[in-house]
Amino acid sequence: MSTELRSRGGGLPHAVFLQRVADEPATSPDVRLGQGAFLALRFVDLLAPNREPPTPDVFRYQWAATERYCAELAGEGTEASHLSCIVRAAGDAHRTGEIHLIAPALFAYALYLEQESHYEEAEDTLHTMINIGVGRLNSADATSAWLRLGRVRRRQADFDGATIAYTEAGRIAGAGGDRRSVLLSRIGHCNVSYFRGNLREAEQGWTALLLDGADDRLVKAQAHHGLGNLLQRRGLAHAGAPHLWRAFELYEEDAEQLRVLNDLGIALLSIGDVEGAERALNEVIRRERSGDNRTNSLIELMQCASFRRDRLGFERAREECLANLDTMSSNIRADYYLKVGIGLARFGNFTKAQTNLRQALEIATAHDLHEFAFRIERIRDGLHACESPEQVEFAGEESALHRDALKEVSASLAALSQ
């Protein structure tokens, strides 16, 4: 598989940042920041190994012009700070000949863009880091860039591209003796299999990782997280919820904890524990002010409200979700339309429910979300069952062992929200 990287901007490097002009007035801060990013990354391109080095005068001129533009953005918040750091690091890298100095600034900017749901822009920034650093980045930086590129591509439902990125990350990590990153690349492949609907392969991979990564807290957390979601999707949420809570306990990063709390809310709602689900989801809303975690939790709170036949709560959450629709990735957007469709059916509006489910299915099909598409079709075929107040979508079979584990999860959630 090829690891060659290309810009998405129709041949012009970094043109994706100029697309903000189509959505905002030319004088808006977002557009000016996009133009600043375009200029900053074009400046970084001067360091590329496959181009003739610029003369000192040309480099100084472009450095001064880019730095001046970024200085004018100084009052525009976090993104402006990232751009200034990139320009400063590029200048230092050129002056010293140590190209690896640019890597931390580019990686930090890519993380920021991903958190803001600017996935194509994050991908472009990671492309820049990888292309500039060919043969000049240390193994750890190169591996991190490819791992993050896999994640960003997966979140855009570019599963083939994600597979290539995770494979390359594993190759570099293996050659450098970085066992943890090899395991993380395997986690990435499991995630791709899961979102493509190959649940058997994903389950085998995560189960193996619980053994192979037994001494690594992060790897164990991600494996438990994946297994918990997979079991919930298979109708075994009673078995999946304890895995999700274990992942929450193992995660050390706040963002990862909030992500797994959202998934735990989904699992608890699917077995009818609305109170527990809302505790988990409201904890995310309380601690997360923007981004995918918050959007996902709002969608699930909308689902909780429709489950309880709370029309006002449903519409309130639906309105807030709708305001974020343009920034949602394809899988979240499909999920939004699915949950709106289920909710409308629960309130007896089957015509609009069918319309929303059709939109969800079109998005899932277009982006190769096979398992998602199968689930949407199954719910659409049994749509009238959504009217039944006691209907639980994935009840599964609950054993005594699972009941005890769920009691522990519920008690822990109650303590968390106090």
Image (cartoon, rainbow, N blue to C red):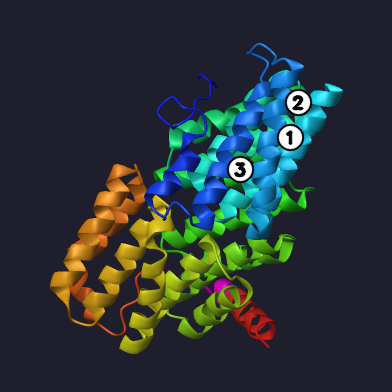
Residue 187: mark: 3
- For numbered disc 1, what is the local secondary structure? helix
Using the numbered discs, state the Cα–Cα distance from disc 3 to disc 2 in whole angstroms. Answer: 23 Å
Q: Position of residue 156 (x, y in %)?
A: 45, 44
Residue under numbered circle 2: 137
Q: Secondary structure at mark 2?
A: loop
Residue 414 locus on image (x, y percent): 64, 85
Residue farthest along the right direction in this orientation: 96
- Going from N to C along the chain, the mark reached first, 3 or 2, is 2
Q: In the image, what residue type sits under mark 3? A: Ile
- Decide if residue 193 is in sight here: yes
Q: Nearer the viewer, mark 1 or mark 2?
A: 1
Question: Do labels 1 and 3 touch, CB within 8 Å?
Answer: no
Vertical position of residue 305 compared to residue 96: above or below:
below
**Image position of 288 (left or right of 15):** right
Between 351 and 295, the residue placed more toward the observer is 295
Q: Is residue 206 above or below residue 256?
A: above
Q: Is residue 178 left or right of residue 275?
A: right
Report whether residue 192 is seen.
Answer: no
Amino acid of disc 2: Leu
Q: Are marks 1 and 2 in contact (CB under 8 Å)?
A: yes
Q: Nearer the viewer, residue 23 or 223?
A: 23
Q: Quadrant of residue 148?
A: top right
The residue under label 1 is which amino acid type?
Ala
Q: Which residue is mark 1?
A: 103
In this rendering, the answer to whether 89 lies above or below 317 is above
The percent position of residue 279, horizontal first and vertical second, equals: 56, 82
